[in-house]
Image (cartoon, grey):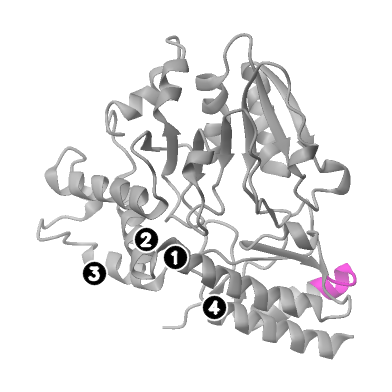
C-alpha cells in the first residue's frame, strides 16, 4: 500500500496507526458484533468511548475542573454564531481581532446577533502578520475578545496570546493539540476536529463554567451551551463515529509523549520546509512575516503563475497532495498538522530544492 504525502488543509492527514486500528475494529467493536457506528449512543460500550475522549482531552490539555468539555456538530462555523448568542449581552460588545478569512466570517455572524467592534486587524497588509498586543484596542463594555489562533489560508499563527482584562475566546480549529497552551488564559476555546483531532463531524468546545450564568434563557435548545454541559453532550445523538475517532487520535497523542512531544516535532517539521524557502534566494516567497509564521500551514508563492502551475504539477507526480494555496491567496500551502510525519516534510523540502535548481 502506497500512502500519499498528504498536505491537505482539512480534512487532513490522520495517523496511520489510528486508521489501522479503526479498520480492525470496524465490523466488531470490542466483541459487540457491531461497528461503533451501529452502537446506541445510550449503550455502555459507547458511553465508555465518549467519556474516554472527554477525559483524554482534559488530561492532554491540562484542562482544570472549572472548565467543561462538550462535543457538538456544525463545525467551527456554527460556533461563529453560538459564541455571541450565548455570551453577548444586550449592552455588551463583541470584540474581534481580524487576522484572516475565518475571523472575518466569525465577525460577520456576530454582527447578526449584537454589537461588535474590530479591536485590531492586519487586513491592510493582506494578513501577513499577527497584531501585537499593544495594537489591540478594546471597546467599552467588551463582552469578550475573539481571536483565531492559527490562520490556515494565510499561514500565520499567534505565538503569544493577548493578556487583557477581558474574556478571551479562541477558534483553535487548526492548531489545537499542536502545542502546549494554558487553557486558563481562555474563557472559551472551540475547534472543528478535521485538522488535528480527527475526522470532520465533531466540534470540541472547552468553556469556563461561570460563562453558563451569562446565557440568556430564550435561545433555541440546540444553540444553548447548557444543553450540552448538563447532558454530557448526549442530549441528542452525537456524531458517535467521529467521537470514537477523536478518542483514538487522543490516545495516539498520548503515546507520542503528549502535547509537548508533538509540539517539538511540529517545530522540526516546519523548520525543514521554512529552511527550503529561506535559502531559495527569493525563488519561494513566503506570505507570512517571519515572526508570525504558522507551524501548521506553510504558505508561499513562486516567481509567477506559470512556474507555480508547473511546481504543483510536478509535485503531484511525486505523490504530494493538497499543496495548492487557497484561491484567495494563490501560490502554495503545505498543511503539516500533527499526523503529517517528519519524513513527508523532509521529502517536500528536498523536492522544493530540486525544483528550484531546475527552474531558476
Q: Residue at x 87, y 48 (%)?
A: 125
Quarter of the image with the N terminus is bottom left
Percent position (x, y) of residue 98? 74, 38
The residue at which mark 1 appears reads as 14
**Neighbour tally class for label 4: few under 14, some 14-19, many 20 plus, Cα within 10 Å:** some
Q: Nearer the viewer, mark 3 or mark 4?
A: 4
Q: Is residue 7 above or below residue 182?
A: below
Residue drawn at 83 percent across, 90 percent down: 358
How far apart are labels 2 and 3 at the CA level? 15 Å
First along the sequence among labels 2 and 1: 1
Looking at the rendering, the stretch of residues picked out in magenta corresponds to: 302-308
Left/right of residue 24 with respect to residue 64 in the rendered view = left
Q: CA distance from mark 4 to mark 2?
A: 18 Å
Task: Tell me the crowding category of disc 3: few under 14, some 14 to 19, or many 20 or more residues within 10 angstroms, Cα based.
Answer: few
Mark in the foreground, 2 or 3: 2
Q: CA distance from mark 3 to mark 4?
A: 26 Å
Q: Is residue 10 above or below residue 185?
A: below
264 left or right, relative to 92: left
Residue 224 visible in the shown view: no
The circle drawn on residue 24 is 3
**Residue labelled with disc 2:** 249
Q: Residues within 10 Å of mark 2 (few under 14, many from 20)?
A: many
CA gap between label 4 and label 1 equals 14 Å
Whether residue 245 appears in magenta in the rendering, the answer is no
Position of the C terminus by quadrant? bottom right
Asked whether the beta carbons under mark 2 and mark 1 sit within 8 Å of each other, the answer is yes
Of residues 307 and 65, the one nearer the viewer is 65
Q: Are the residues tagged 2 and 3 within 8 Å (C-beta)?
A: no
Amino acid at each position: 500500500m502506497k500512502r500519499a504525502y498528504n498536505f491537505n488543509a482539512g480534512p487532513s492527514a490522520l495517523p496511520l496507526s489510528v486508521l489501522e486500528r479503526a479498520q480492525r475494529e470496524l465490523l466488531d467493536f470490542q466483541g459487540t458484533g457491531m461497528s461503533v457506528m451501529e452502537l446506541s449512543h445510550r449503550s455502555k460500550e459507547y458511553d465508555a468511548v465518549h467519556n474516554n475522549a472527554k477525559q483524554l482531552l482534559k488530561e492532554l490539555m491540562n484542562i482544570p475542573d472549572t472548565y467543561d468539555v462538550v462535543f457538538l456538530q456544525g463545525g467551527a462555523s456554527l460556533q461563529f454564531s453560538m459564541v455571541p448568542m450565548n455570551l453577548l449581552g444586550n449592552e455588551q460588545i463583541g470584540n474581534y481581532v481580524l487576522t484572516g478569512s475565518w475571523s472575518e466570517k466569525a465577525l460577520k455572524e456576530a454582527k447578526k446577533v449584537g454589537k461588535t467592534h474590530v479591536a485590531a486587524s492586519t487586513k491592510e497588509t493582506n494578513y501577513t502578520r499577527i497584531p501585537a498586543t499593544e495594537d489591540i484596542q478594546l471597546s467599552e463594555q467588551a463582552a469578550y475578545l475573539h481571536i483565531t489562533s492559527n490562520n490556515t489560508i494565510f499561514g500565520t499563527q499567534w505565538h503569544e496570546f493577548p493578556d487583557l482584562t477581558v474574556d478571551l475566546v479562541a477558534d483553535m480549529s487548526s492548531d489545537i493539540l499542536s502545542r502546549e497552551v494554558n487553557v486558563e488564559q481562555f474563557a472559551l476555546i472551540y475547534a472543528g476536529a478535521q485538522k488535528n483531532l480527527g475526522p470532520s463531524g465533531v466540534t470540541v468546545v472547552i468553556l469556563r463554567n461561570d460563562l453558563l450564568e451569562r446565557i440568556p434563557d430564550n435561545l433555541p435548545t440546540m444553540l444553548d451551551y447548557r444543553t450540552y454541559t448538563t447532558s454530557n453532550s448526549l442530549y441528542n445523538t452525537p456524531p458517535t463515529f467521529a467521537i470514537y475517532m477523536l478518542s483514538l487520535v487522543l490516545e495516539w497523542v498520548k503515546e507520542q509523549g503528549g502535547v509537548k512531544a508533538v509540539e517539538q516535532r511540529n517545530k522540526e517539521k516546519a523548520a525543514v520546509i521554512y529552511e527550503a524557502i529561506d535559502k531559495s534566494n527569493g525563488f519561494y516567497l513566503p506570505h507570512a512575516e517571519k515572526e508570525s509564521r504558522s507551524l501548521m500551514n506553510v504558505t508561499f508563492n513562486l516567481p509567477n503563475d506559470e512556474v507555480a502551475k508547473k511546481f504543483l504539477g510536478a509535485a503531484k507526480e511525486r505523490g504530494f497532495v493538497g499543496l495548492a494555496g487557497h484561491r484567495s491567496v494563490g501560490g502554495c500551502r503545505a498543511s503539516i498538522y500533527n499526523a503529517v510525519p517528519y519524513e513527508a516534510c523532509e521529502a517536500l523540502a528536498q523536492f522544493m530544492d530540486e525544483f528550484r535548481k531546475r527552474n531558476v
